[in-house]
Amino acid sequence: MQSCIVMLKITEIWRTYKQEFKKIVEWTDKWQMKLNIEKCKVISFHHRRYSNNGVIPNYSMNSKLLEELTEIKDLGVYCDPLLLFDKHICEKVKIYMMLKYSINTAVVHTLTMLCILFYLQHFQRDLLRFINH
């Protein structure tokens, strides 16, 4: 009985989504706005990938099946359906590591150049002293 209730709720939710997508299309038609359905995508956020029944929802607009995304980047943040943010964290760590390497390289290079300049100036003074005496 429990699986029937879950399935009914899922079916009801899908029906609601279909109605909402239909309202969006009707609204854009009413206001004479062209909706590029080819660019429309869908992503579902939830605690499990799909229901226990193995039913995968198909979302459509104007009888055009919408592509379901496994991740999305919005305002610079990568999100996946389970809201784990794994890719976002990995990308940020990569950027940090590249910046850290660049800063370390720049610091080492700068210190090396300063040491070389110091030794050249010191050596130049010693060389001038040697020549003058």
Image (spheres, rainbow, N blue to C red):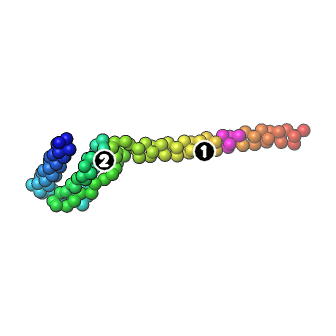
Report whether 114 appears left or right of 54: right
Nearer to us in this view, 116 or 33:
33
At label 1, counting other C-alpha atoms closer than 10 Å, the crowd grade (few under 14, some 14-19, many 20 or more) is: few
* Magenta span contains residue 65: no
Give residue 32's quadrant in the image.
Answer: bottom left
At label 2, counting other C-alpha atoms closer than 10 Å, the crowd grade (few under 14, some 14-19, many 20 or more) is: few
Residue located beneath label 1 in the image: 105
Give the residue drawn at x 22%, y 59%: 65
Magenta: main secondary structure equals helix
As drawn, which residue projects farthest toward the front? 1
Report whether 27 appears left or right of 117: left
Number of numbered callouts drawn:
2
Report whether 88 appears left or right of 63: right
Nearer to us in this view, 116 or 49:
49
C-alpha separation, residue under disc 1 versus residue under disc 2:
44 Å
Sequence-wise, the earlier of marks 1 and 2 is 2
Give the residue drawn at x 11%, y 54%: 26
What percent of the width, then of the height, locates residue 53? 25, 49
What percent of the width, then of the height, locates residue 73? 34, 48
Q: Which residues are magenta?
A: 110-115
Type of amino acid under label 2: Arg
Secondary element type, mark 1 = helix
* Numbered disc in front, either 1 or 2: 2
Nearer to us in this view, 34 or 21:
21
As drawn, which residue projects farthest toward the right? 133
Type of amino acid under label 1: Thr
What percent of the width, then of the height, locates residue 70? 33, 51
Residue located beneath label 2 in the image: 49
Q: Can the viewer see residue 28?
A: no
Give the residue drawn at x 44%, y 46%: 91
